[in-house]
Amino acid sequence: MKILAIETSCDDTGITMLEIIGKDSFRILADELAMQSSLHSAYGGVYPNLAKNEHTKNLPILLERVLSKLTAVKIDKKKPVDLIAVTYGPGLEPCLWTGITFAQKLAKEWNVPIIPVNHMEGHIWGVFGKNKGSFKIPSVKFPVLSLLVSGGHTELVLSKSFLKHKVIGKTLDDAAGEAFDKVARMLGLPYPGGPEISRLAEKVKKSRFSLPRPMMKSKDFNFSFSGLKTAVLYTIRDLGKKLTLELTIELAHEFQNAVVDVLVHKTKKAIEANKIQTLIVGGGVSANKHLRRELKKIKNIELLLPTKELSRDNAIMIGMAGYLRYKNGEFAKRPQNIKAKGSLQLK
Ligand code: KG4
Ligand code: ZN
């Protein structure tokens, strides 16, 4: 069985062709990703209409590339795949729509079903994926806790099975990645800011600054990063021209520590409260070295981290999550009725 997976929820266009080669086993037949971060750099964040136009332009090009890479595999030109998996939310609606309408057109032409996929579910099960060769989803000890940290989301998700989830904590304002991006912008660093802040923060072991750790004492599993971001803004404003490169590095270090301290503290609390044995981390911020280092210190837990390529947005994870749903008999009864859901929740 072959699956074509499409991802267009934010600023990355991804198309992947996966083959199911056994029980929960996958082989990547082709994988194409077009990243737009350099285009959005000037705006200091993702500019939705620009992203939408880029997806529209990229999708047919990437599909052509994927199909042309399949020379070694027997393929029926009239029906190259058995299923299409497409992200329908959460994300930027204009962007989601480009992927959905593209999928609908192909599904009609090839006469194949579509499975709409929740992007966040992709970030969870994508932890078992690779961007080359073959891989398998192993048996998993449920309940699983996932810390999903990206530019649009910061969530703690409790999964009772591959298909049943509950969001037990989330950010009340900015997402962790968004806070990294905004603070980077304040410090004059390019977009996306996460990798830049992280690169600077790793240069020192100590900082002269002391920033707040928001919501550390709250009894729930929620997060808040906007106060921390404002604290950085005031620090920069107060320093004015005295903000040297050395101080910028120390500020980046302290900011990263503050974000990671809160993320790890809440994750630990959720692990204890729910007797978790498996912790999955996903989303762009999961690439952060300091976060990974601190999470590895948590005892009595199996920590699953995605590969660098699969921590960021990609279509492989969408194909994997789509397959798990399809296996459960799920697919869109009326593919033409699939709608983009910008604020889709996991459940
Ligand atoms: O999952 P992702 O690729 O796209 C969204 O769905 O948002 O995440 C992108 C986010 C950006 O905010 C970026 O700054 C952040 O992930 N990020 C990082 C790192 N690498 C990417 N944040 C902190 N440290 C990193 N190393
Ligand atoms: Zn994402």
Image (tube, rainbow, N blue to C red):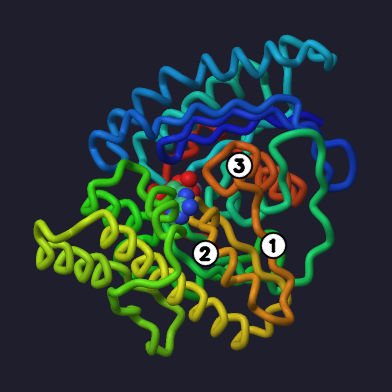
At horizontal 68% and vertical 11% (from top left) the residue drawn is: 68
Amino acid type of the residue tagged 2 in the rendering: His
Is residue 115 shown left or right of residue 323? Answer: left
Q: Is disc 2 in contact with disc 1, using a CB cutoff of under 8 Å?
A: no
In percent of width and height, residue 220 lies at 43, 84
Mark 3 element type: helix
In percent of width and height, residue 76 lies at 78, 12
Measure how far apart labels 2 and 3 are at the Cα level.
18 Å
Query: Which mark lies nearer to you, 2 or 1?
Result: 2
Q: Is disc 1 in contact with disc 3, using a CB cutoff of under 8 Å?
A: no
Quadrant placement of the N terminus? top right
Ranked by sequence position, the earlier of labels 2 and 1 is 2
Measure how far apart labels 1 and 3 are at the Cα level.
15 Å
Is residue 249 shown left or right of residue 32? Answer: left
Q: Can residue 318 be seen in this snapshot?
A: yes
Ranked by sequence position, the earlier of labels 1 and 3 is 1
At horizontal 55% and vertical 68% (from top left) the residue drawn is: 157
Measure how far apart labels 2 and 1 are at the Cα level.
16 Å
Classify mark 3: residues with Cα within 10 Å, few (<14), some (14-19) or many (20+): few
Mark 2 element type: helix
**Residue 332 found in image quarter:** top right
In percent of width and height, residue 334 lies at 56, 35
Ranked by sequence position, the earlier of labels 2 and 3 is 2
Residue located beneath label 3 in the image: 309
Query: Which mark lies nearer to you, 2 or 3?
Result: 2
Residue located beneath label 2 in the image: 290
**Residue 164 found in image quarter:** bottom right
Amino acid type of the residue tagged 3 in the rendering: Glu
Residue located beneath label 1 in the image: 304
